[in-house]
Image (cartoon, rainbow, N blue to C red):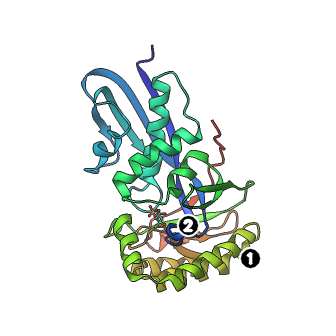
Amino acid sequence: MMTEARAFAPGKLILTGEHAVVYGHRAVALAVNLGTTVSLQKRLGPSGIDSSDIQDARLWPALSTILPEEGIGVHITSTLPIGCGMGSSAALAVATVRAYARLKGEEADFNRCYTEAFKVERVFHGNPSGLDHSVSALGGVLVYRRSPTGPHISPLAPVALHLVVVDTGPPAQSTAEMVENVRIQGNHKVLSAIGKLSEEIIKGLNSPERLGPLLNQNHRLLCELGVSTPTLNKAVSTLRRAGALGAKLAGAGGGGVAIGLVRPGSRVAERMQAEGWKAMDIEVYKEYYDG
Ligand code: PMV
């Protein structure tokens, strides 16, 4: 009988399609080489969080949707910026599903990760599209489309994407609030334009020269949607000036991260840091997890 189990799940970045994915358009996301590790220990008494790198009042309400009320202590460590559009809650959710399955002597396949992690994600994000925890559970790069009959998920062949992430700090509003703002505004013209652009981006994934300008266009549309901020716009323009082929905000917006597409071995992250930005090179987390 196992008394302890541990699992890792990666965070993510959205290359294209944030917000539009909520309305049935396709989005592309990639798992990143940063993530969250969850260790579960059997113990006497009520279950709860024993230690955590993630400080959030919703932590136990979220995890208690998939863990028993009694007998488990949870330890959480994370290398992700928290709540900044890099899928920290999705990575937490998927790692917890996997660790709990292991504690029971099982392995969670994709379907189990998807269904169980969704319960956790709903506590954090209300009515999320499911994109974040899908890419966390699968790894690699994928195309995601929400539909009334369930998600359409197409893992893509390995793509060499070199990105620099700039963390502008936690957004003032939550993902759920940003999604609600977009819903109230109802700017379906822009949402459709983002959907169309995502189709171009999917075709241009292997060509950085083609992809860069498309990411710039994507950022302009996200600005029109009203989800960017002056700091994100500054991060995006500085990324371009520092040598990125294209740049955009990534995630729900209102703060959080911006990404720049760079050439391998570029010094864009260094240049951003020299200007006082929190920047780092990011690699795709390639492990394809199919249970
Ligand atoms: O959690 P974030 O900040 O990466 O945003 C998720 C992307 C949205 O499209 C805005 C919401 C969703 O549920 O897909």
Q: Is residue 162 visible?
A: yes
Q: Is residue 283 visible?
A: no
Check the image and report above or below for 26 versus 5.
Answer: below
- Left or right: 97 as drawn, with respect to 152: left
Helix, strand or loop status at disc 1? helix
- Mark 2 falls on what kind of element? helix
Reading the image, the residue beneath label 1 is 209
Label 1 crowd bin: few (<14), some (14–19), many (20+), radius 10 Å: some
Task: Say what amino acid the circle numbered 1 marks.
Answer: Glu
- Quadrant where the image shows the N terminus: top left
Picture disc at residue 49: none
Q: Is residue 84 left or right of residue 201?
A: left
Work out whether mark 1 precedes mark 2 in sequence or the reverse, and give the earlier one: 1
Q: CA distance from mark 1 to mark 2?
A: 19 Å
Name the residue rendered at 32%, 27% in the picture: 72
Q: Is residue 227 above or below residue 135?
A: below
Vertical position of residue 199 compared to residue 43: above or below: below
Name the disc covering residue 269, or none. 2
